[in-house]
Image: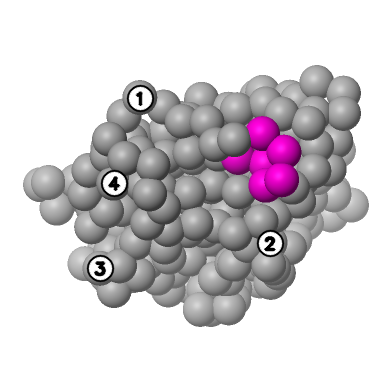
Amino acid sequence: MCSKVPNVKVRRAAQLIFSLAALAGAASCLDVSGTGIADAEIRMVNASGQELGIYLDGQLAIDGSQQLNISLITAASGTHTLDVRTAAGIDTPLNLDLTPGGFTNTYAYTNSSGEVNLVLLDTTEVPAPNMSKVRAINLSRAAGAIDIYASQPGSTPGTQLSPTFDYLASTPYSQRSAGSWEVYITTAGTTTKLLSTGSFTLLPTERRTIVLIDSASVPIFRALPN
């Protein structure tokens, strides 16, 4: 029977910053011992404002994850414990159940008491045939009062993804035909664009989570490959 205890290859998290143009970039991998196959993925967004060590099942997976980083960890399907550790040595664990061929999206943020929280994002929705889905999450403290829209340039007009888009809020998925998408924010109550992802393409049955996050106190967009 295959062991599910990983032999960890540690990568500096500075290599793991994603842009919309390079969603499939560098990743930090956990190799499974024995003859097991790493057949599932964990993606974690660091919105904590501090450097974190990321551990899987007690072993260091990502060394020094910074604000903005999206870390990818591959592991065998099954039950695992994801843990983030601050520079002060304080741990925050999260139990995960990984399915074969599946993925799990999480994010870390610092609450008003200065504690780091780990949050699991639902990743169960599947687009209908020939359709694609987009949602957004607000991890920006600096954005202020904003609205969030999604559109398909040259096709349908922008649609508000959620009536409110406060800090830590996430929107439902918006489903439209596969093809070109754009996500953008406006000042609350207006339709004037403040920040846009620009156009990006989703193939049939693809979905994407767009993350609004702070870079040196300035909101920017990042994307989780789904």
Q: Main secondary structure of the magenta part?
A: loop
**Kind of residue at badge 1:** Pro
Cα gap from disc 2 to disc 3, whole angstroms: 23 Å
Going from N to C along the chain, the mark reached first, 4 or 1, is 1
Crowd tier of the residue under label 3, counting other residues whose Cα lies within 10 Å: few below 14, some 14–19, many 20 or above:
few
Three-letter code for the amino acid on which mark 4 is drawn: Thr
Q: Which residue is mark 3?
A: 217
Considering depth in this image, is 21 or 58 the residue closer to the camera? 21
Tag of residue 187: 4
Distance of label 1 from label 2 (alpha carbons): 28 Å
Residue 98 lies left or right of residue 35; in this view the side is left
Q: Quadrant of the C terminus?
A: top right
Seen from the viewer's position, the closer of residues 159 and 30 is: 159
Q: Secondary structure at mark 4?
A: strand
Q: Nearer the viewer, residue 44 or 176?
A: 176
Picture layout, residue 2 above or below residue 95: below
* Mark 1 vs mark 3: in front: 1
Image quadrant occupied by the N terminus: top right
Sequence-wise, which precedes: disc 1 or disc 3?
Answer: 1
Visible in this render: residue 16?
A: yes
Q: Identity of the amino acid at label 2?
A: Leu
SS at mark 1?
loop
Q: Which residue, given by chain and number where applicable, does mark 1 sit on?
A: 163
**Secondary element at tag 2:** loop
Q: Quadrant of residue 219?
A: bottom left
> Mark 4 or mark 1, which is nearer to you?
4
Q: SS class of the residue under badge 3?
A: loop
Q: Nearer the viewer, residue 17 or 211?
A: 211
Q: Is residue 73 visible?
A: no
Q: Residue at x 85, y 35 (%)?
A: 204
Q: Which mark is residue 23?
A: 2
